[in-house]
Image: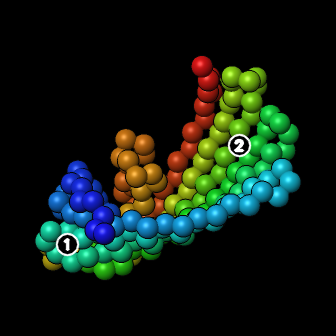
Amino acid sequence: MNPPEHSFPERRIAGVQHDRRQRRKIFGVGAKYAIGAGVVFANWTHTKFEPIVGGDSKLNNYEIGGKYNFTTALNAGLGYTFSDLDGATDGRWHQMNASVDYARSKRIDVYVIGAFQKASGQNIVAGRVVPVQAQIGSSTSYVGVASADTQVAARVGIRHRF
């Protein structure tokens, strides 16, 4: 069985503009385990990019993390992701994430989220060297592509559930 073909908007991966006409084959596996008031998890995903023109690239993401409920109102989480892109485009990313969430009531909570990412590698595009850039999140509307190989993002918020 062949995976469905999709057309995606233009994207930059590892500082290289990718053709919007491509197939992506994605596979992943993960697990989690509860230990008392905590949960630990790990997962791996593999994505193969098959553009109409040019060579294939393969992206492997390895993630491990955990969450702990200190009280019924207070929890914190910590995670690490390593991303490895090989093929026509190359790059490596290390990312740490942390969060704290405090429930003020059944419907209102306040939270702090932080992330740090370090990218490495380079690619040749139109005869010039393009360094791999950090990009926290997959959407440029969230943080956007960094102009360097490191990026930090933080968010403080109040959430009201209806």
- Rendering coords of residue 76 (x, y %): 74, 47
Label 2 residue SS = strand
The location of residue 135, given as percent across then percent down, is 42, 56
Whether residue 131 is visible here, answered yes or no, is no
Residue 150 shows in the view: yes
Q: Name the residue rendered at 76%, 23% in the picture.
A: 105
Residue at image point 60% right, 48% down:
114
Work out which quarter of the rendered image holds the C terminus and state it. Answer: top right
Q: Amino acid at mark 1?
A: Val
Give the CA distance from mark 2 to mark 1.
41 Å
Q: Quadrant of residue 4?
A: bottom left
The numbered mark at residue 100 is: 2
Identify which residue, 111 or 6, lies in the foreground. Answer: 6
CA neighbours of label 2 inside 10 A, class few (<14), some (14 to 19), many (20+): some
- 100 with respect to 4 (left or right): right
Label 2 or label 1, whichever lies nearer to me, is: 2
Farthest top residue in view: 162
Element assignment for label 1? strand
Name above or below for residue 74 compared with residue 85. above
Q: Say how many tags the image has.
A: 2
Q: Quadrant of residue 149?
A: bottom left
Which residue in the structure is indicated by mark 1? 125
The residue sitting at 82% across, 58% down in the picture is 35
Determine whether, in the image, residue 120 is placed left or right of residue 157.
Answer: left
